[in-house]
Amino acid sequence: MKRQESELCGKQEAAGFTLVEIVITIVLISIIAALAAMVILQGVQGYSAEDQRSNIHYEARLAMERMTREIRLIRNQGTDIATMTSTNLQYTDVNGASVGFNWTSPNLSRWNGVGYDLLASGITSFTFSYLQQDGVSPATTANVWFVDIVITSSQPGSDSLVMHSRVHPMNF
């Protein structure tokens, strides 16, 4: 009965939201969504940067492993080393193939007898050093006993990774 009386008197009860309430809700949800998007974006950027840094270091490690493995295969001590500078080493391996390695910043490449194949990029520093048995730098290729390799790989704005390897060719 009361309901009928109130309807007859022209009174109606509100059953919705006002425009101000809806606008405030939209603004609050937008702020929360923007904060969540910033957190997610920072995570994605961090993952991407670490993945790229990891790839550069992985390439450098693979290049170091390949160089040490192949330098062990230099055929003869004196006659088969064609070039030995701090950034370039060319030689003949036990199979008679011409092999070499060259660094031109930031790329480390391998000579395949015809041209250069890219081994690693992002190499910021590279050095070949040649040593005699007593640890002194040799005067000629005939006195080379060890080949030292030092590689530094890095990405701008990140940590660098320095790797060092001393190789003694198996036929020396």
Image (spheres, rainbow, N blue to C red):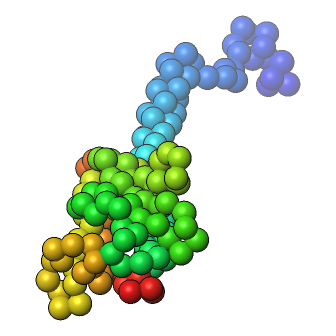
Query: Which residue: 31% across, 60% down?
Result: 83
Query: Which residue: 36% across, 54% down?
Result: 102
Tell me where residue 61 sits by quadrant.
bottom left
Tell me where residue 56 sits by quadrant.
bottom left
- 97 sits to left or right of 163: right
**Height in image: 58 above or below 155?**
below
**Could one spot residue 40 in this view of the protein?**
no
- Quadrant showing the N terminus: top right
Q: Nearer the viewer, residue 118 or 70?
A: 70
- Quadrant showing the C terminus: bottom left
Q: Residue furthest bottom?
A: 134
Relative image position of residue 23 (x, y in whole percent): 51, 21
**Height in image: 45 above or below 146?**
above
Query: Which residue: 16% across, 74% down?
Result: 139
**Could one spot residue 26 in this view of the protein?**
yes
Q: Nearer the viewer, residue 24 or 69?
A: 69
Q: How many tags in the picture?
A: 0
Relative image position of residue 115 (x, y in whole percent): 50, 45
- 122 sits to left or right of 3: left
**Height in image: 30 above or below 154?**
above
Relative image position of residue 67 (x, y in whole percent): 44, 69
**Height in image: 160 above or below 106?**
below
